[in-house]
Image: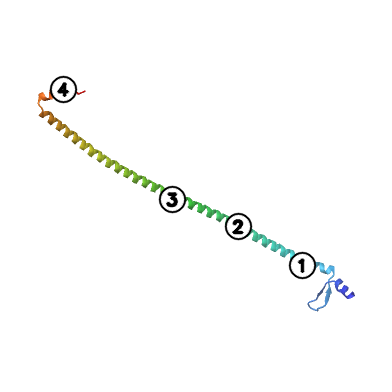
Amino acid sequence: MLHLMETVMREPVINCPRCHTEIKLTESLAAPLIEAARKGYEERFAEKDAAVAKREAAVRDQQAQIAKERQSIEAEVTARVDAKCKRIACEENEKARRLVETDLQQKDQQIADLGQVLHQREKKLAEAQKSKLISSARNVSLTTPDERSISPWKNGSSHPC
């Protein structure tokens, strides 16, 4: 048990690299080594913290760049969609204009056709009226003046009622 206590209570030892003798590390000898080791670890931690901070800053910069590019892409997509909508609207307006124009041309043709029919009918009516007038003029000229004064009705009245 004593032997166990000796190993537990023993002070740290280092071996000399030249003569291989054991040198006991007392607190006064170990303090500068411990301080140097502590400073070394603190420097490494500081370097690693700086590297992590640098990587985090780079990631934030990349995220900001990605956000800008996303906005740019969204703006471009919006512009393309708006342009396509305007183009489609123009095409539809042109189609509607052509349909209305075609419809108006058909209506104009119908009006012209009806005008021709009306003109032909007026011509026929005028011919019929002329023919009737000529016929009645012939009938009047064929009758004698005495016959014109004779009424077909009894008692010389002009109308049977």
Determine crowd level at label 2: few under 14, some 14-19, many 20+ residues with C-alpha closer than 10 A.
few
As helix, strand or loop, the secondary structure at mark 2 comes to: helix
Q: Position of residue 82 (x, y in %)?
A: 48, 50
Marks 3/2: CA–CA distance: 37 Å
- Closer to the N terminus: mark 1 or mark 3? 1
Circle nearer the viewer, 3 or 4: 4
Q: Position of residue 115 (x, y in %)?
A: 26, 39
Marks 3/4: CA–CA distance: 87 Å
- Residues at circles 3 and 2 in contact by the CB criterion of under 8 Å: no
Which residue is drawn at the image coordinates 16% and 34% (left, top)? Answer: 131
List the residue tagged with mark 3: 88
In which quadrant will I find the C terminus? top left
Q: Amino acid at mark 2?
A: Gln
Marks 1/4: CA–CA distance: 159 Å
- Closer to the N terminus: mark 3 or mark 4? 3
List the residue tagged with mark 2: 63
Location of residue 49 (image quadrant): bottom right
Marks 2/4: CA–CA distance: 122 Å
Which residue is drawn at the image coordinates 27% and 40% (left, top)? Answer: 114
List the residue tagged with mark 4: 154
